[in-house]
Image: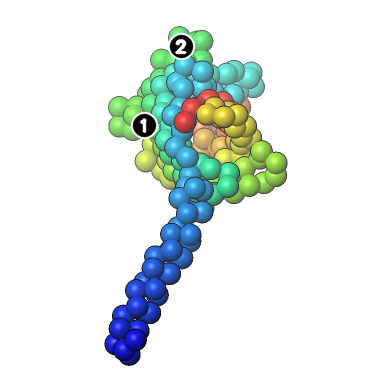
């Protein structure tokens, strides 16, 4: 066998080895690539709890969407984006529901949508996670960490959690409402998300 022929054969063997190694290296990444979930709007809920004149009340956002890409085995590729139509808030009080979309509160005419965009998702324990990101309401963006539990059974996933925000940080409830005795500053937000692959 000549020197040049031997070199060509070795070159082909090296190329084949590189291709095989590259395939093996990429296989785990492909298998662990984060799963995209489709949120079921009929069984998912986004609600809040706050106080007015010291009396607790609850409400629910009737219109929201979420884009969720998440695989517990590959959290580095996870992402969560939620969009909430603030004008869809319902608190079972016609007077309150008529006030909340106004300029002093959500100012729906100027800012119809609130958003949450995650920067990272981390595990906190068995089936316990947190998404670190930014919440934007009325054009004001504030860092927020969303804790949530997650259960995955086959093609179905269920996530739930609660987080508290300070409405003053977003300019929600200004003017005559900017007093804690009139409307509490702390607002608790609860989310129950059901999704399928």
- Whether residue 165 is visible, yes or no, is yes
On the image, the x and y values in percent for residue 160 come to 60, 30
Q: Where is residue 177 in the image (x, y as percent from the top left)?
A: 49, 28
For label 1, the crowd category at 10 Å Cα-Cα, with few meaning under 14, some 14 to 19 and many 20 or more, is: many
Against 11, residue 170 (above or below) is above
37 vs 57, nearest the viewer:
37
Q: Which label number is shown at residue 183? A: none
Give the SS element for disc 2: helix
Q: Which mark is residue 113?
A: 1
Q: Residues within 10 Å of mark 2 (few under 14, many from 20)?
A: few
Let me know if residue 137 appears in the view: no
Name the quadrant of the N terminus. bottom left
Question: Residue 56's image quarter?
Answer: top right
Q: Which of marks 2 and 1 is in front?
A: 1
Is 127 situated above or below 108? below
Residue depicted at x 52% and y 35%: 167
- Asked if marks 2 and 1 touch (Cβ < 8 Å), the reply is no
The residue at which mark 2 appears reads as 95
Q: Position of residue 42 (x, y in %)?
A: 47, 16
Query: In the image shown, does 174 or 153 lie closer to the viewer?
Result: 153
């Amino acid at each position: 066998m000549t020197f040049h022929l031997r070199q060509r054969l070795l070159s082909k063997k090296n190329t084949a080895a590189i291709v095989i190694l590259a395939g093996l290296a990429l296989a785990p990444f492909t298998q662990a690539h984060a799963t995209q979930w489709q949120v079921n709007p009929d069984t998912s809920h986004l609600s809040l709890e706050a106080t007015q004149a010291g009396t607790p009340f609850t409400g629910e956002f009737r219109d929201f969407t979420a884009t969720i890409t998440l695989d517990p085995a590959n959290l580095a590729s996870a992402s969560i984006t939620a969009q909430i139509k603030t004008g869809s808030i319902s608190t079972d009080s016609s007077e309150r529901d008529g006030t909340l979309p106004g300029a002093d509160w959500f100012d729906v005419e100027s800012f119809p949508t609130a958003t949450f965009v995650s920067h990272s998702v981390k595990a906190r324990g068995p089936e316990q996670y947190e998404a670190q990101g930014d919440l934007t309401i009325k054009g004001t963006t504030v860092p927020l960490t969303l804790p949530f539990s997650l259960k995955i059974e086959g093609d179905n996933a269920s996530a739930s959690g609660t987080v508290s925000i300070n409405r003053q940080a977003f300019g929600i409830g200004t003017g005559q409402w900017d007093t804690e005795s009139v409307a509490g500053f702390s607002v608790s937000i609860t989310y129950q998300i059901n999704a399928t692959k």
